[in-house]
Image (spheres, coloured by chain):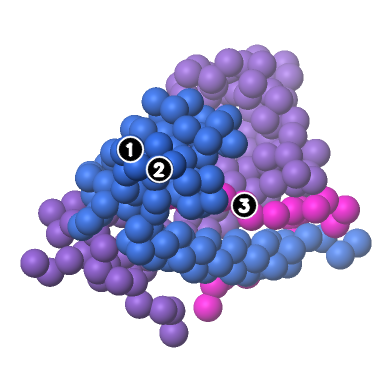
Chain colours: A blue, B purple
Amino acid sequence: MAKALKTILKKKGNFKVNGSLWIECNAKCFFGPGPVELLKNIDETGSINKAAMKMKMSYKKALELIRNLNEQAASPVVITQSGGDKGGGSVITDEARELIAYHIRLRNRFKKFLETETKNLSKAKINT
Amino acid sequence: MAKALKTILKKKGNFKVNGSLWIECNAKCFFGPGPVELLKNIDETGSINKAAMKMKMSYKKALELIRNLNEQAASPVVITQSGGDKGGGSVITDEARELIAYHIRLRNRFKKFLETETKNLSKAKINT
C-alpha cells in the first residue's frame, strides 16, 4: 500500500497529477498524439498534404513522421499512390489502424493512472 | 484484460513507452522534477541563490517557484532567515521533505507504469 500523504496542501487548491506520454524507438520519438492525429487526418482527407495543413504541420514534417513510422513498422502504415483517375493520394493501412487503436487503449490506461494519482493527491489536503 | 497488440513493429527496434509527469494547481504547473531539485539544493546549500546556480536556474525563477510552492502548501516549504551570525540563509521545512518524499513515490509508480507498458509493447514485435 502506498504510504499516506501528510496533509500539506491547501484545501481550496484544485490539484491534479498530469503528464504526457510517447513511444520511443531507439531513443528517438516514434509515436504519440501528433503522429496519431496525422494518420487520422490522412485517413479522412486521402492526402498527406491536406492532412498536414489541417493540423498546421509542414508537409516536410509530415513526410518525416511518416517515413519514421514506415521504417519502424513491420509493414508500411501509409501507402502513397501516384497517378490514376484521382491523381494519386495516400491511404493508411491496417497496421496504422492498429497503431491508432493501441494508442487509444494506452491513453486510456494513462488517464486512469493520472486519475488515481489525482485522487491520492487530494488526500493531502488540509481539512481545516 | 487489455486487448493484445498485433505484431506490427520491427523486431530489431528498441521500443519504449516514455513520458513526463507533473502536478498542477488550478491548471498551473505546481510541482515536478524542477521544484524538487531546487528544494533538495536549498537543503544542501542553505541558500536559494546557490541552489539556483547549482542547477543553472535564474534566482528570479527560483524565487518564483518557491513563492508558488509556499502559496499552495498549507504552511511554507522554504523559510528565509535574514541577518544573524551567518548573514541569513534559507531552510526547507518538514512540508518540503514530505513533498519530496511523495514525489519519489509518485515517480516510482509512474516508472512501474512505463515499464509495464514497454513490456506490453514488446509483444507487438514480429517474430520473423
The amino acid at mark 2 is Asp
Q: Position of residue B76 (x, y in %)?
A: 75, 40
Q: Chain of mark 2?
A: A
Foreground: disc 2 or disc 1: 2
Query: In which quadrant of the rendered view does residue A17 lie?
Result: bottom right
Query: In which quadrant of the rendered view does residue B7 lie?
Result: bottom left
Residue B44 seen from this side: no
Q: Quadrant of the N terminus of chain B?
A: bottom left
Q: Position of residue A15 (x, y in %)?
A: 74, 53
Local packing at callout 1 (Cα closer than 10 Å; few below 14, some 14-19, many 20+) is: few
Vertical placement of residue A50 versus A75, above or below: above
User: Residue at point 55% right, 31% down?
Assistant: A53
Foreground: disc 3 or disc 1: 1
| Residue nearest the viewer, comparing B85 with A30 | A30
Q: Chain of mark 3?
A: A
Check chain identity for marks 2 and 1: say if they share one: yes
The amino acid at mark 3 is Asn
User: Residue at point 68% right, 40% down?
Assistant: B29
Total numbered circles:
3
Do the CB atoms of the residues marked 3 and 1 lie less than 8 Å apart?
Answer: no
Q: In the orientation shown, which residue stands out farthest toward the right?
A: A128
Q: Position of residue A76 (x, y in %)?
A: 26, 52
Judging from the image, what secondary structure is the residue with disc 3 in?
strand
Boundaries of the magenta span = A1-23
Q: For mark 3, what is the residue?
A: A18
User: Residue at point 75% right, 30% down?
Assistant: B67
